[in-house]
Image (cartoon, rainbow, N blue to C red):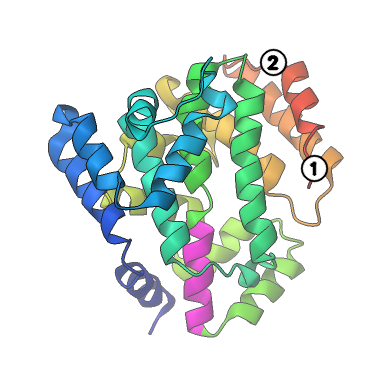
Amino acid sequence: MTSTEILKHTIENLPKLPNTIRDLRKYLDASGDNFKVSDIARIMGQDPSLIAETLKVANSAMFGVSHRIATIEQAISLLGIRNLKSIVLDTGVQKSIRIDVSPYGLDSTVFMRECTLESQFIINWFGNEDKALSQLLMPCAMLLRLGIIIFASSIKQLGKGEEFLNKLKASRFKNIGLIEMEYFKIDSFSFLSHLFRHWDFDEQIITMIEYCVKPYNASSEFKKGAYALAIVNTLFGTYSYDKKVAIDRCVEIIQEAEMQGITFSLNNFVQNAQLIKF
């Protein structure tokens, strides 16, 4: 099998999502804007872990509610369908896919912990500066690393995990996208946007993820979100982690964004970035 065939095979043979999650996605896709909160709550009621994760997100600082969200019906009304779909997919992936990112030289446990830190950082960064953007980016942060997870699985199926890792090491982990393209003719971020389109995911989320590698190419509608994701990806995507180097790179991206007419509070970013504990 070629690497491209392996990647296609991996996608086609991903473990099935739990029944509750598949039923819920099917209902949401079919009902469109005509969904009923009671129907969603009934389907979600079959999976206590999905309810727990949804309530956790609804009660997070991102939504700034003044009272505790105690029922799944309240959480659904607060989150909206876009966020709910992302939580559903993220929960399903974590339940269904064995995560092993060792071909990228990463510890899988640390990798998942940092994914959680990314979401928390977005909440802290934009909590007061731009709450609407925070709510928009939260689902992206949940899904941003799925491309790496699937690529790592395909590389291991090829039996080239060590070879791939050695190439990353030789490049000092600076040319990850180019090395991915050697194997799959596409980088993991671009692949992710294709995968989400295949799953008929929210186009706004897809576009921001697609352009976070080159945010300056995004249209004005998506440019701020793409730049924000580029900053988050830079902050959390540094190997042999050096927080100061990562923050300095992010500051450069913020300055580039300003030249594109996109403004972030530099002091707010730096203050929150310095609080991260890896």
**Residue 223 image point, x, y percent:** 49, 25
**Residue 51 image point, x, y percent:** 40, 43
Which quadrant of the structure image shows residue 163? bottom right
For label 2, the crowd category at 10 Å Cα-Cα, with few meaning under 14, some 14 to 19 and many 20 or more, is: few
**Residue 101 image point, x, y percent:** 60, 67
Q: Which residue is mark 1?
A: 277
The amino acid type of the residue labelled 1 equals: Lys
Which quadrant of the structure image shows residue 255? top right
Residue for point 34% across, 41% down: 85
**Front position in the image: 76 or 70:** 70
Label 1: state its secondary structure: loop
**Front position in the image: 47 or 112:** 47
The label number, if any, that marks residue 88 in the structure image: none
Instruction: State whether the magenta stretch is mostly helix, strand or loop.
Output: helix
The amino acid type of the residue labelled 2 equals: Ser
Label 2: state its secondary structure: loop
Q: Could you tell me how far apart the alpha carbons at marks 1 and 2 are, in whole angstroms?
A: 21 Å
Q: Which residues are magenta?
A: 147-158
**Front position in the image: 177 or 207:** 207
Q: If you read the primary sequence from the N terminus, does the residue marked by circle 1 or circle 2 appear first?
A: 2
Is 274 left or right of 259, judged from the image as shown? right
Mark toward the viewer: 1 or 2: 1
| Residue 255 drawn above or below residue 212 | above
Is 147 left or right of 127, judged from the image as shown? left
Q: Which residue is mark 2?
A: 265
For label 1, the crowd category at 10 Å Cα-Cα, with few meaning under 14, some 14 to 19 and many 20 or more, is: few
Work out whether residue 130 can be spotted. yes
* Quarter of the image that includes the N terminus: bottom left
